[in-house]
Image (cartoon, grey):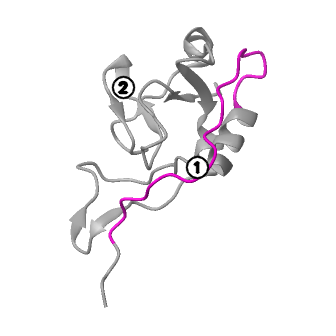
Amino acid sequence: MELLYYIASLKHTSRKHEHISWWGKNHAGYTPVVGDYIGTYSHSEAMELNDGEDCIAVPVAVVQSVLSPEPYHRPGARFYDQVGPVVPNATAAWRVLIAGSNPKTTPKPRQFTGRRRSFAWKPTE
């Protein structure tokens, strides 16, 4: 069975984003949701795309190990239009993704450090 990859977009994920952006199916678009719209790529295709500057190819199993549940902006309303879990744009998640990506990729992307602003809804008392 061939190993499948997701492609993390470093160009479309900045420090201000709460979740990592992924390439869509057939090289079309980007999505923060690991669901129906995310593209899966073969090993050979992923290694061609895996430049370490604009994107990194990460095996599906590695991505699934750092998934967070589907986020909500407020009860009953979706944070994103799509349904599915996400990968937090956090140092811990990036360390796992980078460690699980192709070891020959140079340069590796820099991990986001420090705190980012959270837009998650919090109930007021």
Judge left or right: residue 48 versus residue 78.
Answer: right
Residues in magenta? Answer: 101-121
Which residue appears at 39% of the width and 42% of the height?
32
Residue 123, position as x, y percentages in the image: 31, 81
The question of residue 82 being in magenta is answered with no
Q: x and y percent of residue 16 in the render?
A: 43, 44
Of labels 1 and 2, the one closer to you: 1
**Residue at image x 63%, y 18%?**
52
- Residue that sits furthest to the top in the current view: 48
Mark 1: few, some, or many residues within 10 Å (few <14, many ≥20)? some
Q: Residue furthest toward the right?
A: 103
Which amino acid does the dot numbered 1 rest on?
A: Ala
Tell me where residue 58 appears, x and y as whole percent: 62, 31
Q: Residue at x 65, y 47 (%)?
A: 91
Q: Main secondary structure of the magenta part?
A: loop
Would you say residue 119 sits in the magenta stretch?
yes
Q: Which residue is mark 2?
A: 25
| Location of the N terminus (image quadrant) | top right
SS category of the residue bearing label 1:
loop
